[in-house]
Image (cartoon, helix red, strand yellow):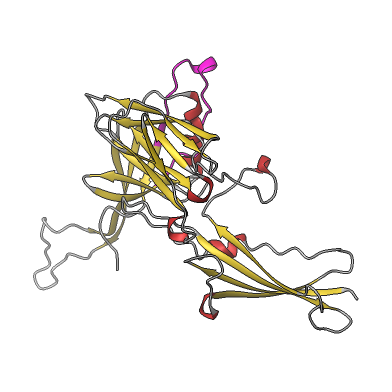
Amino acid sequence: MALLRADLNIYIYTGTQGSFTDDDLRYTISKEKLSSDSNIVIEIGELVKDYIDVTFNNDYTSTTKWVSITTTLIDSDTNEAFASGGTFTNHYLAFEGFGYFEDEINPQLSTNALITTSNIYVPDDTACKIPILAEGVGKYVIGSTTTQVTDSGNSNQKIQYLTVPANTTDNVVIYATDDSTVVKTMVVNNVCEPKFTPYKITFINKYGAYQDLYVFKKTTEKFNVKDETYKVNTVNESNITYNTYDGQRQRYNTNAQTTLTVNTGYVSEDFTTAIEELFLTENAWIRIDSKTLPIIPKSKSMSMKTVLNDKLIDYTIDFDFAFNKINNVR
């Protein structure tokens, strides 16, 4: 009796764990074991990622999906499933997140607070959001107010966003499901900015949650134009003349790419992790004139600033809007 191959059915769906149907079958994979190996390794991360929809319009919804994998192990002697333990199903909760190299293979990311930094900066008179994984949090406390967190098991509420009221001066203390172990303490910094207009940037962080980051200082906008031209024959052959107001070159395929340069203002050293994740994100948006607009980090290099080396820490970042200046959506 020896292992020949593994046959996998991969189901990706929303709802509660194990509630998949045949309509949720996304992949069927079969892989034989090499004679030199003792096991079979199948990487499904990129396959699952294709079915995690990431969209944002100033709403904060859970983007997680359930992944259920039914595995059948085939015996090389009978070419059928092993009589005992030959077929089994595993369930996983999938996020649009990522781990770092030093986290090693298949890292287990946060199971409670879905944010790395312990400091958040918000404009005066502005409420803010903190992402958590509902199944790992029992309650959170702001001042004298305690709020219990419940988890129904449905994928649409696995990631929840705690609302911190405007002008809160108390820390946000997040507890594990035992309601006694503190897993995260968030410091809310209310920033009064009388000169510049703060802008809210929202991005998918390393835990696969929407995270807000405000930029408080100078913001500049510029755009670079691209076009093509062709040469025009303007001679009127009937009288062998031409109009001086008709050009010899005609412009076409004109468009522009708009770039924003933003400055965070002074932040704590621990806030560097949020900037780092913003540089690495695949999805980001900025809130301008009551519209949520997609942006792409244009800056490709980042110097890690520290209090020891830099005294005061702030970051300047360039973004491209993820669309053309002239609407050519077809």
Q: Residue at x 31, y 50 (%)?
A: 58
Residue 208 in picture, x, y percent from top left: 50, 50
Residue drawn at point x = 13 percent, y = 69 percent? 236
Most foreground residue, 233 or 200? 200
Tally of numbered discs: 0
Please tell me whether residue 312 belongs to the stretch shown in magenta: yes
- Residue 27 lies, with reference to residue 281, above or below; the image says below
Query: Which residue shows up at 50% across the image and 38% down it?
Result: 175
- Given residues 260 and 184, the one toward you in this image is 184
Could you say where residue 285 lies in the image, as x and y percent from the top left? 36, 47
Residue 216 screen position, x and y as percent: 31, 30
Q: Which residues are magenta?
A: 296-317
Determine which quarter of the picture holds residue 148. Answer: top left
What residue lies at 89% left-to-right and 69% top-to-bottom? 35
Occupied quadrant, residue 259? top left
Quick check: 196 above or below 153? above
- SS majority, magenta: loop
**Residue 147 among those drawn in magenta:** no
Report the quarter where the N terminus lies: bottom right
In the rendered view, would you say 322 is above or below 76? above
Q: Quadrant of the C terminus?
A: bottom left
Horizontally, residue 139 falls left or right of residue 247, namely right
